[in-house]
């Protein structure tokens, strides 16, 4: 399987609390909910198309808690996101959580990078990571993320947790898809393509 990361970002690279004011108040963050007014049909279709590609999910503890508190209650068989989340395997990177009522959940308590490498060695399409910023930092630093699905919203918040930090492994990506919704969200998919190629720009 290939490991993909789906992330909602502001123009200045913040992923923290896109969905609501109280989603993540870490470090006194006061801008939660910055994505809420931009959703449209095009964005929904983009998300549905991403979920259609998955054979399993890899989630950090905070994102898992948010998802587990909502998606098991969505039982509409025509909801493509709920159907995938409620029926496919969910692997959770956590040092503390040991049990869950959400069917299909497995906890990864060991070296998360090594555990992810084992999961990627299994047959299938995408092992998808959604949100899960702290986990994303670890896996970007290890160079094991194959695909980036980035939705960039037309807003700057100034402060907050950034997706790309100075721990990320230098990586070159190829743009596989890009379009813009009527509300101004830039929807992109990038595929990892080895190390960056450096050079000098000539006058």
Image: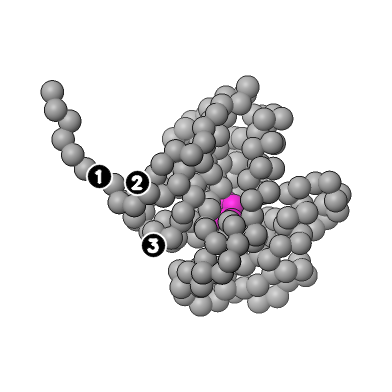
For the residues labelled 3 and 1, the Cα–Cα distance comes to: 19 Å
Instruction: Please report whichever mark, 3 or 2, sits nearer to the chain's N-terminal start.
Output: 3
Q: Quadrant of the C terminus?
A: top left
Give coordinates of residue 79: x percent, y percent: 80, 46
Q: Tell me, for residue 50, which label it has, or none.
A: none
For the residues labelled 3 and 2, the Cα–Cα distance comes to: 14 Å
Looking at the image, is mark 3 or mark 2 nearer the viewer? 2
Residue shown at 58% from the left, 56% from the top: 126
Left or right placement of residue 190 versus residue 67 in this view = left
Instruction: Please report whichever mark, 3 or 1, sits nearer to the chain's N-terminal start.
Output: 3
| Most common SS among magenta residues | strand
The residue range painted magenta reads 128-132
Its colouring scheme is: one colour
For the residues labelled 1 and 2, the Cα–Cα distance comes to: 8 Å
Q: Quadrant of residue 128?
A: bottom right
**Do callouts 1 and 2 mark residues in contact (Cβ within 8 Å)?**
yes
Is 164 covered by the magenta stretch?
no
Q: Which residue is mark 3?
A: 142
Residue shown at 46% from the left, 73% from the top: 114
Q: Which residue is mark 2?
A: 172
Observer able to see residue 43? yes
Depth check: 115 or 92 in front?
A: 115
Mark 1, residues whose alpha carbon is within 10 Å: few (<14), some, or many (≥20)?
Answer: few
Q: Which residue is mark 1?
A: 197
Give coordinates of residue 115: x percent, y percent: 51, 73
Mark 3, residues whose alpha carbon is within 10 Å: few (<14), some, or many (≥20)?
Answer: some
Instruction: Please report whichever mark, 1 or 2, sits nearer to the chain's N-terminal start.
Output: 2
Which secondary structure lies at badge 3?
helix
Q: Quadrant of residue 58?
A: bottom right
- Outermost residue on the right side: it is 76
Residue shown at 77% from the left, 52% from the top: 82
Observer able to see residue 69? no
């Amino acid at each position: 399987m290939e490991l993909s990361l789906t992330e909602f970002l502001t123009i200045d690279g913040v992923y923290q609390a896109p969905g609501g004011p109280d989603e993540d108040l870490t470090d006194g963050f006061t801008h939660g909910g910055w994505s809420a007014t931009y959703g449209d049909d095009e964005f929904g279709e983009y998300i549905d198309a991403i979920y259609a590609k998955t054979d399993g999910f890899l989630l950090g503890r905070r994102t898992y808690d948010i998802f587990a508190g909502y998606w098991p209650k969505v039982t509409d068989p025509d909801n493509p996101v709920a159907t995938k989340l409620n029926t496919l395997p969910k692997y959770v990177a956590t040092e503390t959580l040991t049990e869950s009522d959400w069917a299909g959940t497995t906890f990864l308590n060991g070296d998360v990078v090594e555990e992810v490498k084992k999961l990627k060695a299994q047959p299938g399409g995408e092992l998808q990571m959604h949100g899960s910023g702290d986990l994303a930092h670890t896996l970007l630093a290890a160079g094991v993320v194959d695909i980036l699905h980035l939705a960039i919203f037309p807003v700057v918040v100034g402060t907050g947790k950034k997706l790309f930090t100075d721990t990320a492994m230098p990586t070159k990506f190829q743009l596989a898809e890009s379009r813009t919704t009527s509300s101004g969200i830039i929807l992109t998919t990038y595929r990892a393509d080895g190390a960056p190629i450096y050079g000098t720009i000539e006058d």
